[in-house]
Amino acid sequence: MAKQTSIIWKDFYWGIAQDDFLTTWKQILYAENIDLTSSSDYVSLAKDSEWRFTTTDQVNWFIDAQSGTSKDVFAYTDDGKIYDTEDWTVESSAIWDKIYTAFKFNGYLYFVSNHPTAPFSRILESSAYNNTNWASLSVNFALWTAISTWAADIFPTLVYLDEYFYIGIGNTVYKVDDANVVESFDIFDGDVVGLTRVWGIIKVFTDKGTIAFWDWISSAVDSVISIQEPIRWVINNWKVDFIVSWHSDFQSRIKILNGYTVQGLSNARYSERLSDYIWKISFTDTNMLGKLWDTIYFVQDWITWNDLFRYWTNNPVLRAWFNVALAKDSNANLITKITSIYWIEFTSVDRVRIWVDSNSQNAFEYIDINTTSPTYKPSWYMILNPIDWWFKTIKKKIDKITLVTSNCDATETIEVLYSIDWWAFTSLQTINSWTSLTRTEIFSANDSFYDIQFKLNFASSGWADTPQFYELKLDYIEIEEK
């Protein structure tokens, strides 16, 4: 007698699986511009950009000036300009022709540039917030007469309790106090590319792959470990360091440093179903790593374009949970390059700022995360993992396919497609009615299969709403004996 079985796909908040078959039912093979994190009950389209401004400048990164609970965010560029990102006006272009990094210390915003006489420029945070006194930015602070550039142009900084700041320049770390007294520590192996701190220990990361645990009180190195690969950049989140390392000329890796233990977050792997490598990460610039709450954002390289990926879990022992946060710009063009992402928390709206190069056009965009009236991406998709139920030799047959959806109408639709035995996806049905929670049963497909895979196309022509997908259930029977 034929055996009847059911399987249900739901709760996709675990994100993208790292293997085509080794997975849980709470993971998917791939998705673009699909929101897997806002609700664990359903999947919807991701939010789209709220604002776009075309520019001719490459943004290196962002810094904010704060007044109470309000913040004004400034972008600094590869050609020495500082923009107010609220209206994209140039507040300063006097520093020089390149700004490497910026940081806040002792009530000031500092900018580090290749200016020959004043590489360290500063402005009171209150003046920056009120957009005053920008004209004197390039001359009101001179810590060193010059900064020698080096290959990576990375000048990592670390502020300690607003009493000192540390900056890495070449293979030296400089300590500067609030009276501008400078101490230098030329004790590190390789050029310094990152500085983080946990309690009294400062971790110094170098391009030679070494990590020195440096006691800031005694100014002595407690211990040194190596990750065996050059380090490019690092960001700390909840006392855990996320490290970008160069594995080869075409591939970087993200590693986790927890205490003194280093483990790989993910390695590039070829996917037979996607016909491409997944998790192939290419970092050519700094500041392509960001965080908001317990989520880490990084740039994913797909050879000819960039995607913005997110990783969420503050427990590095667990399997990494990934999702594609941004696959196209707000004009639906492939993003050729991303050089900077920056999350800022407001009292009412959390916002991501991103600089992109797409369709031969440089642009600055931002996306509001928890706005009450968002716009959504118009049409994107998710692919579920292929399933053979561990037996490619046993033929099965579809009995019924059931979907639970909501918020579908003539312009908000979800198309269901399936792939039988490694062939191309075929459309089954487009759900375009019932705005409330509803169940759709499909009896028309009764194919036999050894291997089956589903795909869901989301569409929202109005961009002001999104269809929601809750669950897919497949009833099938085995028509061959084991």
Image (cartoon, grey):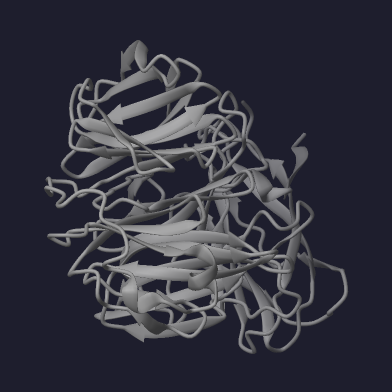
Task: Give the quarter of the figure containing the N terminus.
Answer: top right
Q: In the image shown, does 346 or 463 lie closer to the viewer?
A: 346
Is residue 360 rendered to the left or right of residue 466?
left
Q: In the image shown, does 146 or 452 lie closer to the viewer?
A: 146
Q: Is residue 468 above or below residue 160?
A: below
Where residue 478 sits in the image (x, y, percent)? 68, 39
Q: Is residue 401 visible?
A: no
For the point 45% across and 61% down, which residue is it?
63
Q: Quadrant of residue 167?
A: top left
Task: Give the quarter of the figure containing the C terminus.
Answer: top right
In the picture as drawn, the residue positioned furthest to the top comes out as 222
For the point 83% across and 79% down, which residue is it?
435
Q: Is residue 294 visible?
A: yes
Q: In the image shown, does 290 or 158 lie closer to the viewer?
A: 158
Q: Quadrant of residue 156?
A: top left
Is residue 242 rendered to the left or right of residue 455?
left
Where residue 171 sits in the image (x, y, percent)? 19, 31
Q: Quadrant of residue 332?
A: bottom left
Q: Is residue 235 above or below residue 10?
A: above
Q: In the image shown, does 283 or 116 lie closer to the viewer?
A: 116
Where residue 480 sits in the image (x, y, percent)? 62, 35
For the point 23% across and 22% down, which residue is it?
188
For the point 45% across and 18% down, which residue is it?
217
Where residue 111 sits in the image (x, y, percent)? 33, 59
In the picture as drawn, the residue positioned furthest to the front comes out as 179
Q: Is residue 103 above or below residue 430?
A: above
Q: How many discs mark residues in the rendered view?
A: 0
